[in-house]
Image (spheres, grey):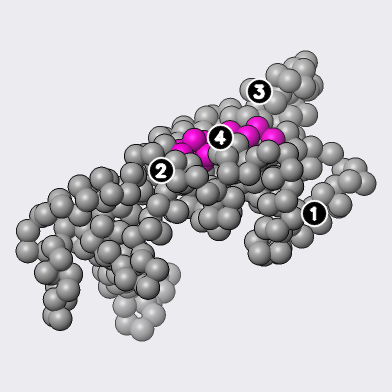
Amino acid sequence: MSTQTAPRNGLSQKQRRMISRPLQYLVLAGYLVFLAFPLLFLLSTSFKTSRELNSPVPQLLPESLEFTNYVSAIQTADLLTAGRNSLIVALATTVIVTLLSLPAAYALARFKTKLRGLATGWILLSQVFPFILIIIPLYIILQQIGLIDSLVGLVVVYAVWSLPFALWMLRGYVAGIPVDLEEAGAVDGASRPRILRTIVLPLLAPGLVATSLFTFISSWNEFFFALVLIQDPDLQTLPLTLARFIGAEGQVQLGQLAAASLLATIPSLVFFAIIQRRLTSGLLSGAVKG
């Protein structure tokens, strides 16, 4: 007597899988197109001429690849100086926030003290304040200590602003590491620094990468603090420089803005490509050591 059950709705599991898989690919392709469309539109716009951009019948693709927008954007807006300033600020902020949040997140996740609840409340409360509420006292403080209109002052502001969320992110990664692994290391005679270096840090590498990526991108794209705190044209960051392509009367130099925006995304993509490898290696390292 056969024990095989009859397929539901007249279709076997293999047949249902053959039908659903093309649908899954179709949905995935649509999602990828949705995500990539702004970038493709920006790329297409950066190569269009003024005649194509002002045409009453807009076209998705340019007639030819014209690099005049890129040349004009670099020459008129001094993108190299702005990119250098943004890179200095973003990298310095990322290093400071990562170094400060790592021990703080470990202590917050592992040690149950009375300050743990207060620290958690401070982290969450700091994320609900809008920028406009703190910008005036922040400006006065930075002016009194001589950090107004300087990249150092901007780094301090970005580090203070990014630290709570980075700390909250890392705390979750630390809490996800089983305490049993550290206890097993202690039973084997490993000291606390060695346990942190050989067990915790490899498993925490993906969290460090994610935190540094979030900090770098948020600092790279930040506009409001830089607009208020930076007046020297030689110290302006990329978001401020890109805003110069929008005239006071709302007239947008669309071709140059698209070209400059694409150039401004290159460092972020390079940074992501570099640490993305570290993210993968960190996961594998943690899996092996775990």
- Which is nearer the N-term, disc 4 or disc 3? 4
Q: Which residues are magenta?
A: 85-100
**Residue 43 vs residue 215: left or right?**
left
Residue type at mark 2 is: Ala
**Residue 135 vs residue 260: left or right?**
right
Which quarter of the image is occupied by the C terminus? top right
Mark sitting on residue 284: none
Location of residue 110 in the rendering, given as x and y in whole percent from the top left corner: 79, 39
Residue 151 visible here: yes
Residue type at mark 3 is: Arg
Front residue (pair 214, 240): 240
Q: Which residue is mark 1?
A: 122
Q: Mark 2, mark 3: which one is toward the viewer?
A: 2
Marks 3 and 1, how far apart in space? 29 Å
Location of residue 119 in the rendering, given as x and y in whole percent from the top left corner: 82, 49
Residue at point 78%, 29% (across, down): 183
Marks 4 and 3, how far apart in space? 24 Å
Marks 4 and 2, how far apart in space? 15 Å
Q: Mark 4, mark 2: which one is toward the viewer?
A: 2
**Residue 100 vs residue 266: left or right?**
right
Marks 2 and 1, how far apart in space? 34 Å
Label 2 sits on a secondary structure element that is helix
Front residue (pair 182, 53): 53
